[in-house]
Image (spheres, rainbow, N blue to C red):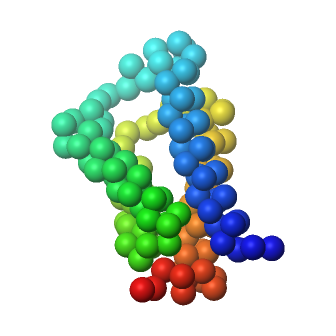
Amino acid sequence: MDLKRIFRNLILLNIGIFILIIFSSIYQSTKLIDLKQTLAPGFFDTQFGIALVVVILLMYIVAVYCLYNFKPLGKSLFLLTILGYIICLYLGKIQIIDQITYILQYIATITDGAILTLIYFSPLKDMFKK
């Protein structure tokens, strides 16, 4: 089994799931959309909250590119992206999502953990040194 190929496929899977999460969030049922509108505004309804999400999204794009090409910056940037995502979850308001989006988020979390494990605790960690 080629660990390098598995790692790259995990990164591609993570990107694909991320895109699916975006599409599943856009195409939710009207009942969920109406229910979301009844919630009080949260942190991400502010300009700073939106800017934070955009910064984390840009960090994610750069991080997965660097990881795919085994650049040293990718390791720390991906970890910071995951930590930023966790902070966003903490600051955000209650989320109402459908089952498909929930499953996709769960799978994305598993792939994030697998990627972090491989870049810090597997023989692949040596490939990020220059």
Any part of residue 87 in sight: no
Q: Quadrant of the C terminus?
A: bottom left
Q: Among all residues in the image, which is located at the extreme right?
A: 1
Q: Is residue 80 rendered to the left or right of residue 97?
A: left
Figure quadrant of residue 78: bottom left
Tell me where residue 4 appears, x and y as whole percent. 66, 72
Q: Tell me which residue sits at (54%, 82%) in the image.
A: 127
Q: Tell me which residue sits at (43%, 23%) in the image.
A: 36
Tell me where residue 97 appears, x and y as whole percent. 55, 32
Q: Quadrant of the N terminus?
A: bottom right
Tell me where residue 63 appears, x and y as whole percent. 42, 61
Q: Between residues 39 and 119, which one lies in front from this camera angle?
A: 119
Q: Tell me which residue sits at (46%, 15%) in the image.
A: 34
Compared to residue 39, the image places residue 71 above or below, namely below
Tell me where residue 2 appears, x and y as whole percent. 75, 73
Q: Tell me which residue sits at (47%, 18%) in the image.
A: 33
Compared to residue 66, the image places residue 31 above or below, namely above
